[in-house]
Image (cartoon, rainbow, N blue to C red):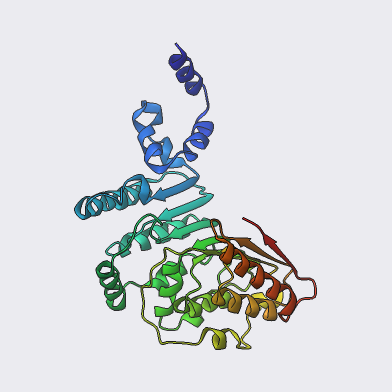
Amino acid sequence: MVSRRKSDLLSNLPDCLLVTIISLLPFKQSVQTSILARRWKNLCLETTNLVFKESEFVNLSTDTETIKSKRSLFVSTMCQWISSFTGEVIESLEFSLSEPVSFEKAIVSLTEFAASKQIKNITIDFSSPASRKIDVIEHLVTLMHYQNTEFDITRIFFNLIHVRNLTICSFLIQMIQECEDPMEMHDAMEARHLVMKTNLHANEFVGIKIFLNSCPELESLTFHMDTTERIVRVSMPLDPKAFWLTNDTYECLERTLKLVKIKNFRGGPNELHVLKYLMRRGLVMEQLDLYEAKGLNDGQRRLVLTAAEEVQKNVERGSKHLRITLHKA
């Protein structure tokens, strides 16, 4: 009786409300609603918040062949879905795939779809789950693939020009450096809020500067420290301290960037090098938020406190209005 009443209540709702409800479901479940009744058949194709997560299709603890098969199913289902999409407005898009090898065309197609719908909030994540350990052989195979791939990373970023809220992973930060002239991307990006899932590894430094240069209207920048990221390109050795002591500056640092956050802050040397650069060159910065990483031991917490104190007291500031806050875990 209760089930029938709930069904009747849903049946009485207008399509616009049903689409809103479906938009809150995970991708796999939203697709499954199409078999509920004839009326529901195409409602999932009008959702406004798209979340394509590999984890809904792939169990990374299973054998390699099963993972490959399920991953291919996930990507093909996603491609079929976007090719059949009937809605007009999409508010947000999130796409996660732990191994983009051999799926370059699908990824480009997804970003082209995003551009055609003028989606303003996008997350693209190619990082591996923290629970999955990548062995040395797999890492080397991936590295060799991306050193020799014809994957045109520039096309992806061309399709992201109009995104206002953008979240990217270390993979994209590293691969943008493969563009023929990465400091002269097609047009300025319109991103106002940028989140980087990163280790602040030296291999990512050039990519970080490319994004600073490419986002002249950037208002907030978040570094989400992620220890599961892989190195997918080989770069020339560089001195992190010397790299960030440069006087290079960018339009966003001089005019628009007011908020910087570091999540999972551990007070490491590279974190400090990047922070000092941003504080020195950020002429309009108003807030720096450091979020202490969880699960630290006493020694690691002392390192965080020492680093925060150094940033607070001993670093040159380009903005006299800058406030610095350490948020305890």
Residue 98 horizontal/vertical position (percent): 36, 58
Q: Nearer the viewer, residue 284 or 162?
A: 284
The answer to whether any part of residue 150 appears in the image is no
For the C terminus, the quadrant is: bottom right
Residue 155 pos. (x, y %): 40, 70
Q: Position of residue 102 (x, y in %)?
A: 27, 64
- Image quarter of residue 36: top left
Describe residue 9's horizontal placement relative to residue 80 as left or right: right
Residue at horizontal 48 percent and vertical 19 percent from the top: 6
Q: Is residue 107 left or right of residue 12?
A: left
Screen quadrant of the N terminus: top left
Quadrant in the picture for residue 306: bottom right
**Above or below 177: residue 322:** above
Q: In the current view of this chain or complex, which residue is farthest to the left? A: 65
User: Picture quarter containing residue 135?
Assistant: bottom left
Task: Name the residue nearer the viewer: 132 or 203.
Answer: 132
**Name of the residue lying farthest toward the right:** 320
Q: Is residue 324 above or below residue 178?
A: above
> Farthest front residue?
298
Tell me which residue sits at (26%, 67%) in the image: 138
Say above or below: 198 vs 277.
above
Residue 100 left/right relative to 219: left
Give the residue drawn at x 48%, y 57%. Answer: 123
Image coords of residue 157 (percent x, y): 46, 69
Q: Nearer the viewer, residue 30 or 204?
A: 204
